[in-house]
Image (spheres, rainbow, N blue to C red):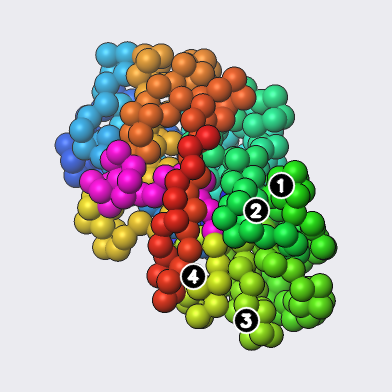
Amino acid sequence: MSTSTVLGRGMATVCILGVSAAAAVGVARADEMVKIGEAAPVTGPASYLGKDTENGARLAIEEINQTGLVIGGKKVTLVFDAQDDAGDPRQATQVAQKLVDDKVVAVVGHMQSGSTIPASKIYSDAGIAQVSPSATNPAYTQQGFKTAYRVVATDAQQGPTLADYAAKTLKVKTVAIVDDSTAYGQGLAVEFEKQAKANGITVLSHDASTDKAVDFRAILTKIKGEKPDAIMYGGLDGTGGPFAKQAKQLGMTMKVLAGDGLCADDLAKLAGDAADNVICSIAGAPLLKMSGGPAFVERYKKRFGYAPVLNSPFAYDAVGVIIDAMKRAQSTEPAKILAAMPATDHQGVLGETQFDAKGDLKHGVISLYKYVGGKQALLGVVEQ
């Protein structure tokens, strides 16, 4: 994942804006211009999450340029190369190749697991560090690529946490599972199912939908006949919201368990009052409980005019991790940046970021939420 605002851009415009912004803050006399790539969906159903992801990375780069960056004795200006992968695996590989051709030194992205995983081979072949702010499918870092990193916990942590909560707190005995057939949704559902069975929960069914579905009445009618204690949905809020809403319309009042793709502040816009039936997880600490969270919120709101949505603090720190590696390497060469990545020990908005041998966080955090009157309320935080 586990996933509100939109826009698109072209590379020429981004370069011009990047240079103009640098000039405005007095660093245009830099000896070197260095491109940082970023990829997320800023069109399509997840566009508001993608824009939030892009904003987080953009804010980090603007602040670094304002402060000034010196690497190997040279003044460096960062140029933000943001690309739209539309949440589509095929487009994600095209975007990845474009970023490689643009000669970025590292990449923040992609946002979704279904885009991150296929793009990762292109970055691996090019020897460019890729730091995803939000891809949670365990497979991303299990491919053996030395270029793949993430600053978020995985579904191998998120799915079991949901299943444990279902068994131990909700006392669920039977569950029906539905996923959207994406790498994220299916991966989360599989991890949930494994732990649910280990906890003694009977899985009555596991159905597959799509990430473009709008009508779930056939699946839900079947599940209603199964009479589960709860339903687990693996997917984003664009489909999960209507899923929960239609379930309630059919008189199904059991809890809907979901991951971070569904766990948005404004879920009620899509689910209506059925949001109060949802319990969801986020692969990270609550923003205001992050060590740099409150200050980040204020800077983000001042820059963009609205509050962060979900992924922006992770994207912000993904940039920070890359620049930290650059500073330790005292080089802007992709190979030297990559070589410095394993020793990362970065203090940022999220707190401390360190990686294990695969590129996953050494210390992941999962937050659990419910909704009361359509408003998100924290249930608790589980440290992995």
Image x and y of residue 81, in percent: 45, 43
In this image, 86 relative to 8: left or right? right
User: What mark, if any, has residue 267 been given in the picture?
Assistant: 4
Describe the element under mark 4 as helix, strand or loop: loop
Q: Amino acid at mark 3?
A: Lys
Q: Are marks 2 and 1 in contact (CB under 8 Å)?
A: yes
Q: Earlier in the sequence, mark 3 or mark 4?
A: 3
Q: Are marks 3 and 1 in contact (CB under 8 Å)?
A: no
Describe the element under mark 2 as helix, strand or loop: helix
Image x and y of residue 282, in percent: 50, 51
Q: Are marks 4 and 2 in contact (CB under 8 Å)?
A: no
Residue bounds of the magenta highlight: 280-297
Asked if the magenta segment contains residue 291, the reply would be yes
In this image, 196 relative to 384: left or right? right
The image quarter in which residue 324 lies: top left
Marks 2 and 1, how far apart at CA: 6 Å
User: What mark, if any, has residue 167 been given in the picture?
Assistant: 2
Q: Nearer the viewer, residue 32 or 215?
A: 215
